[in-house]
Structure formats: structure tokens, C-alpha cells
């Protein structure tokens, strides 16, 4: 399910406008455009957007492919060190939920941490999902994390 750029967590209006001008209107388009680390660098060059910012958006676009992971939960997952579906797939749902509970207790990032059943679904889906775009390359070549 595609998420329009305006609804993707962390897309600033000026960045969204620059990407839309290049024909990138949602997370699927962004992932299609950024198939390799070199593509991220090229998009940064033609759009005038910092490559690290593009990389963060690509990571968020990847996570947004999973139903139920919206802006607030992307932020929570990022704070827990999870930047992509590949990262998510490596976690035990039980351990991840405990980590998210602890993190949210300290920082109050979301109103409610997702239930274990939801996290189970996310992890299961992440494990079945094909890796797309620059995520398949392992990193972005820009030194960003």
C-alpha cells in the first residue's frame, strides 16, 4: 500500500515538493527511484536534497510498506535502532516489544506501544518481504545511518 509523500514521516514540505517535481509522489515511487546507493546520490544531486535526508526517507519508505507502521511507529522504531524492514525482520517480537515499552516509558514517543500481536505481524511480514531499492544494497553509500 503506497503512502503519499505528504504522509510519509519526516518529509518536509520543500523536500516533498522537490521530489514530486521529479515524479516521486509516494513511498513506492521513492523506492523504485532509489534502487541503488548511486541512485540515492543521483537523486540528491538532481533534487538539491542532502543525501542523508534522502537515505532516511528511503528507510522510512521501506518501513511504511508494512501495514500499521505509520509515522509515529516509524519514529519509535527508529529510536530503537530499526531503520528498515531488514532490521525489523532480525528481531524477536517479544524482545522488540519490551524494548519499545522501555523506550516509550523514557521518552513518551507514542500514546501506546503496539500490542505484541501487532509486532508479531510486522516482524512476520518483514521476514517475508522482498528487499527493495537501495535497501538491497545494504547501505546507501553516503555514510548516513
Image (spheres, rainbow, N blue to C red):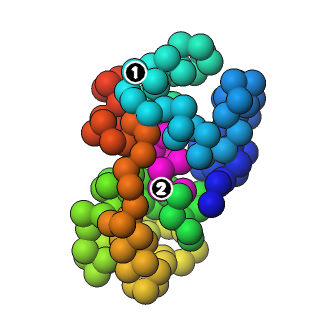
Q: Secondary structure at mark 2?
A: helix
Image quadrant occupied by the N terminus: bottom right
Going by the image, does 135 lie left or right of 90? right
Residue at coordinates 51% horizontally, 64% vertically from top-left?
Answer: 66
Q: Position of residue 18 (x, y in %)?
A: 70, 24
Magenta-tinted stretch: 58-64
Magenta stretch secondary structure, dominant: helix
Q: Position of residue 120 (x, y in %)?
A: 38, 80
Image quadrant occupied by the C terminus: top left
- Nearer-N-terminus badge (1/2): 1
Residue at coordinates 70% horizontally, 48% vertically from top-left?
Answer: 4
Q: Nearer the viewer, mark 1 or mark 2?
A: 1
Q: Nearer the viewer, residue 123 or 9?
A: 123
Residue at coordinates 66% horizontally, 53% vertically from top-left?
Answer: 3
**Height in image: 67 above or below 18?**
below
Q: Are marks 1 and 2 in contact (CB under 8 Å)?
A: no
Q: Which residue is mark 1?
A: 38
Q: Secondary structure at mark 1?
A: helix
Q: Dot 1: few (<14), some (14–19), or many (≥20) neighbours within 10 Å?
A: some
The answer to if 101 sits in the magenta stretch is no
**Height in image: 67 above or below 35?**
below
Q: State the CA–CA distance, disc 1 to disc 2.
A: 21 Å
Q: Which residue is mark 2?
A: 63
Q: Quadrant of residue 16?
A: top right
The answer to if 61 sits in the magenta stretch is yes
Q: Position of residue 95 (x, y in %)?
A: 25, 76
Q: Is residue 63 visible?
A: yes
Q: Quadrant of residue 96?
A: bottom left
Amino acid at each position: 500500500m503506497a503512502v503519499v509523500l505528504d504522509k510519509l514521516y519526516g518529509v518536509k514540505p520543500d523536500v516533498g515538493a522537490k521530489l514530486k517535481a521529479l515524479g516521486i509522489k509516494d513511498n513506492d515511487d521513492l523506492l523504485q527511484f532509489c534502487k541503488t546507493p548511486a541512485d540515492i546520490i543521483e537523486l540528491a544531486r538532481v533534487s538539491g536534497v542532502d543525501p542523508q535526508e534522502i537515505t532516511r526517507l528511503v528507510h522510512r519508505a521501506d518501513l511504511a510498506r508494512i501495514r500499521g507502521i505509520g509515522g509515529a511507529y516509524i519514529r519509535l522504531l527508529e529510536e530503537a535502532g530499526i531503520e528498515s524492514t531488514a532490521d525489523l525482520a532480525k528481531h524477536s517480537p517479544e524482545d522488540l516489544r519490551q524494548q519499545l515499552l522501555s523506550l516509550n516509558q523514557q521518552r513518551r514517543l507514542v500514546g501506546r506501544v503496539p500490542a505484541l500481536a501487532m509486532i508479531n505481524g510486522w516482524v512476520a511480514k518483514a521476514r517475508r518481504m522482498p528487499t527493495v531499492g537501495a535497501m538491497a544494497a545494504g547501505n546507501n553509500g553516503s555514510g548516513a545511518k
